[in-house]
Amino acid sequence: QVQLVESGGGLVQPGGSLRLSCAASGSIFSIYLMGWYRQAPGKQREWVGTTTSDGRTTYANSAKGRFTISRDNAKNTVNLQMNNLRPEDTAVYYCASNLGTSSPTWGQGTQVTVSS
């Protein structure tokens, strides 16, 4: 299984943007479903969105219209562009692969804090 490393988190003001990247240690070409989840303090991990191997994307209602997932199979990366960020988007964001299988893989997470 590939290892996943997220980057790009940080502190941003409400209304701002961040781009998270997920770098895989190997080829993601054959991995059908990859995506992003997040976990806020005191809350359960929640789904943000997913992308298929052919680039189709699906988003949680909280992410629709503001977040965009892009996948580059040649570079073995999956990115999450987040615009118009809100304080409630504050969370640790996790990249995941092999979703929908018996052995999904998770990254270590990257902190996103939206605050003025």
Image (cartoon, helix red, strand yellow):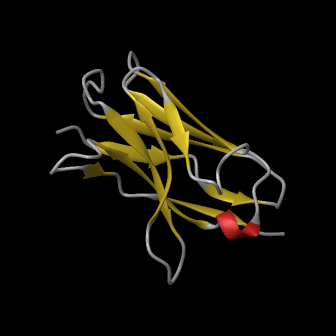
Q: Residue at x 46, y 56 (%)?
A: 37
Residue 6, above or below 73: below
Position in image of residue 6 (x %, y %): 44, 47
Position in image of residue 53 (x %, y %): 36, 24
- Relative placement, left or right, of 46 versus 116 is left
Q: Quadrant of the C terminus?
A: bottom right
Looking at this view, name the residue that lies furthest to the top: 74
Residue 101, above or below 24: below
Position in image of residue 60 (x %, y %): 57, 52
Q: Who is closer to the viewer here, 23 or 105?
A: 105
Q: Quadrant of the N terminus?
A: top left
Position in image of residue 107 (x %, y %): 35, 52
Q: Quadrant of residue 67?
A: top right
Q: Residue at x 16, y 50 (%)?
A: 103
- Relative placement, left or right, of 3 versus 55 is left
Q: Quadrant of residue 70?
A: top right
Q: Who is closer to the viewer here, 46 or 39?
A: 46
Q: Who is closer to the viewer here, 22 or 34?
A: 34
Q: Who is closer to the viewer here, 13 or 15?
A: 15
